[in-house]
Image (tube, rainbow, N blue to C red):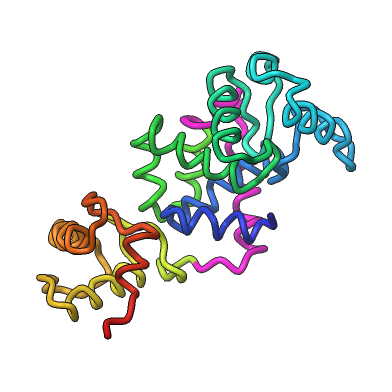
């Protein structure tokens, strides 16, 4: 995955522009934004990293060894044994490989949602690259050294490299729910209003009323009524009525 693709994946997951850039500054510091990266492997060819991944994928290195060896792995350098074990299980459940960037990012989002809910909510709405870099470093990465300024500089450099919109406009639509804002929220409001749902304001802010109407829409279409407009709900929202 390129850095642009990593950014797009984070945005698609529902993270704000500033949140995604702040995360990527940390990923750059941890691994150079590489998914096949073993702690301490500075060789350009990443031979050690590739050999390590192949052994874990084949089972030559067991789940126990992988989780307990204390070596950081992947794009955000998973190190703690319970987190590595959870990632190993996640990869196996998805019939994947431990160097797969998409799976690593999905597991990161899963960890944020389940284990760091306050940070997750912040990253979805923040407009500050500095604060997102700092909080992700301190709360999620929890590094042994305080190098937040360096990570922030990396985030700024990545922001300059990418075709990344600092506004809330993003398409294809992200996963969105209450408290988020942007052009995709306004699209959702407009479509639901056109279909007769009680959305009385189209302003790009996901408020309590929109959450209620999304739940009604989900119920009407046999979806989980969680008020979150994710891929399945978007699919139904964007279907053309005939």
Residue at 52% of width from left, 44% of height from top? 106
Magenta residues (range): 138-165
Q: In which quarter of the image is the C terminus?
A: bottom left
Q: Where is residue 162 in the image (x, y as percent from the top left)?
A: 63, 64
Q: Where is residue 48 in the image (x, y as percent from the top left)?
A: 86, 30
Q: Where is residue 100 in the image (x, y as percent from the top left)?
A: 67, 44
Residue at 70% of width from left, 39% of height from top? 99
Q: Quadrant of the N terminus?
A: bottom right
Q: Position of residue 203 (x, y in %)?
A: 23, 73
Q: Quadrant of residue 201?
A: bottom left
Residue at 57% of width from left, 22% of height from top? 85
Q: In which quarter of the image is residue 177?
A: bottom left
Q: Nearer the viewer, residue 185 or 223?
A: 223
Query: Is 53 colored magenta in this rendering?
Result: no
State whether the magenta stretch is mostly helix, strand or loop.
helix
Q: Quadrant of residue 143?
A: top right
Residue at 28% of width from left, 54% of height from top? 228
Q: Where 198 falls versus 77 (above or below)? A: below
Q: Where 221 falls versus 123 (above or below)? A: below
Q: Where 127 falls versus 57 (above or below)? A: below
Taking the image as shown, residue 86 lies to the left or right of residue 60, namely left
Q: Number of numbered discs present? A: 0
Query: Is 145 colored magenta in this rendering?
Result: yes
């Amino acid at each position: 995955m390129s850095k642009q693709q990593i950014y797009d994946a984070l945005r698609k997951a529902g993270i704000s522009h500033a949140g995604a850039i702040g995360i990527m500054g940390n990923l750059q510091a941890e691994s150079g934004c590489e998914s096949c990266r073993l702690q301490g492997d500075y060789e350009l060819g990443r031979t050690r990293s590739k050999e390590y991944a192949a052994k874990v994928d084949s089972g030559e290195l067991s789940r126990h060894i992988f989780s307990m060896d204390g070596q950081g792995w992947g794009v955000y350098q998973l190190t703690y044994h319970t987190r590595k074990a959870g990632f190993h299980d996640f990869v196996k459940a998805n019939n994947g490989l431990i160097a797969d960037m998409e799976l690593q990012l999905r597991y990161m989002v899963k960890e944020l949602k389940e284990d760091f809910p306050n940070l997750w909510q912040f990253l979805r709405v923040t407009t500050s690259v500095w604060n997102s870099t700092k909080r992700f470093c301190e709360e999620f990465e929890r590094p042994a050294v305080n190098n937040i300024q360096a990570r922030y500089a990396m985030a700024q450099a990545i922001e300059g490299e990418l075709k990344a919109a600092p506004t809330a406009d993003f398409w294809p639509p992200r996963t969105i729910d209450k408290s988020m804002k942007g052009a995709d929220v306004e699209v959702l409001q407009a479509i639901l209003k056109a279909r007769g749902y009680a959305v009385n304001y189209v302003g790009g802010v996901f408020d309590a009323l929109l959450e209620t109407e999304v739940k009604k829409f989900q119920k009407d279409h046999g979806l989980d009524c969680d008020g979150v407009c994710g891929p399945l709900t978007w699919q139904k929202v964007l279907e053309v009525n005939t």
